[in-house]
């Protein structure tokens, strides 16, 4: 099981969050839309949209060692999306496609950094298992935790996470069919200078809270289930970046259990024209949060930022926590 690691300090970047279903800058709205404040930690399960190659390996055959995938030019980070024109979505799909070939050449369709390519290769029968393999370590599911920022009143549309879903090399991943589950924080590894901290959470149950229909550089967007209980959620208006000022503000985050808490921060810098949509530098000033976590840690991305009672943005940084469920990683 691997996790992404990164450096977090007391000073952190905040962003003007994108409201509505598709990411865009906040603007004043005549209908005065209102948003339920998030702050709850959620578990995200995302399909890789195929089988993602996370490693290359050898295949031990009767006549020696073979590297079909590597020899064909397949790279770590590629996603296998089809074999001989048949769509590949899961590990089982790939396994079935390789068994059907019977050792004959197949045409593998790949997605690489937003582009597609096709490579021919010949699967090799593994001496030990008797299965046909191409020499790759793959996964079809990504999972991690982050924080819900807001849910729009009436529509149930939400924004969360505050940044792209990235791999270990900081490359944004293309994902599909993301589902959102309630997550309970059961522990915190404190952050320190030169060392990232992290929230440790468990999915509360298998009930889906929401489904994300859009994964962008600024986070995940979608719709909450209609039966979600908002009775304890605070309702606020959103403010444009022009209303943000240097000075006191608050964030809502969950660092224990499932209930968000309000913590004091200070906005140290406002950059309304930032082209990467990173419009604030914030500093954690709340002694409670500093004592519990050491500052902002992995899993708090997406925590809503409020100033003067209005929602102005979200905590964000470049990376996303992703781990690989053991049962979703296989050699082929």
Image (cartoon, rainbow, N blue to C red):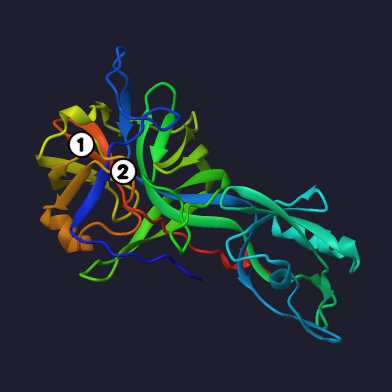
At a point 48% along the width and 47% down the height, the residue shown is: 181
Residue 154 pos. (x, y %):
41, 21
At a point 58% along the width and 61% down the height, the residue shown is: 77
At a point 73% along the width and 76% down the height, the residue shown is: 67
| Residue denoted by label 1 | 306
Quadrant of image for the C terminus: bottom right
The answer to whether residue 314 is left or right of residue 50 is: left
Q: Residues within 10 Å of mark 1 (few under 14, many from 20)?
A: many
Mark positioned earlier in the residue sequence (1 or 2): 2
The answer, for residue 135, to whether it is visible in the render is no
Q: How many marks?
A: 2
Q: Nearer the viewer, residue 281 or 225?
A: 281
The answer to whether residue 11 is left or right of residue 213 is: left
Residue 223 pos. (x, y %):
48, 32
> Where is 144 relative to 275, above or below?
below
| Residue denoted by label 2 | 39
> Where is 299 relative to 313, above or below?
below
- Disc 2 is placed on an element classified as loop
Q: Residues within 10 Å of mark 2 (few under 14, many from 20)?
A: many
């Amino acid at each position: 099981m691997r996790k992404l690691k990164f450096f977090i300090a007391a000073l952190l970047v905040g962003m003007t969050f994108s409201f509505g279903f598709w990411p865009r800058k906040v603007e004043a709205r005549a209908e005065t839309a209102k948003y339920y404040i998030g702050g709850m930690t959620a578990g995200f399960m995302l399909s890789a949209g195929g089988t993602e190659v996370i490693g290359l390996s050898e295949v031990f055959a009767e006549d020696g060692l073979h590297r079909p995938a590597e020899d064909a030019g397949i790279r770590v980070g590629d996603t296998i999306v089809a074999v001989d024109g048949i769509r590949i979505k899961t590990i089982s799909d790939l396994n079935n496609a390789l068994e059907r070939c019977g050792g004959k050449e197949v045409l593998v369709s790949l997605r690489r950094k937003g582009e597609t390519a096709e490579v021919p290769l010949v699967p090799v029968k593994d001496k030990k298992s008797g299965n046909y393999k191409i020499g790759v370590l793959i996964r079809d599911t990504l999972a991690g935790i982050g924080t819900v920022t807001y849910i729009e009143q009436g529509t149930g549309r939400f924004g969360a996470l505050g940044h792209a879903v990235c791999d270990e090399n900081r490359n944004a991943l293309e994902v599909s069919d993301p589902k959102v589950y309630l997550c309970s924080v059961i522990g915190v590894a404190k952050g320190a200078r030169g060392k990232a901290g992290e929230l440790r959470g468990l999915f509360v149950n298998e009930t889906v809270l929401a489904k994300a229909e859009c994964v962008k550089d600024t986070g995940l967007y979608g719709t909450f289930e209609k039966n979600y209980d908002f009775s304890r959620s605070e309702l606020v208006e959103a403010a444009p970046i022009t209303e943000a000022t240097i000075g006191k503000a608050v964030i809502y985050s969950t660092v224990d259990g499932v209930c968000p808490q309000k913590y004091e921060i200070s906005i140290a810098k406002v950059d309304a024209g930032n082209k990467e949509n990173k419009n604030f530098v914030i500093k954690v000033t709340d002694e409670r949060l500093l004592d519990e976590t050491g500052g902002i840690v992995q899993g708090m991305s997406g925590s809503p930022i409020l100033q003067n009672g209005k929602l102005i943005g979200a905590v964000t940084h470049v990376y996303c926590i992703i781990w690989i469920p053991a049962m979703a990683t296989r050699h082929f």
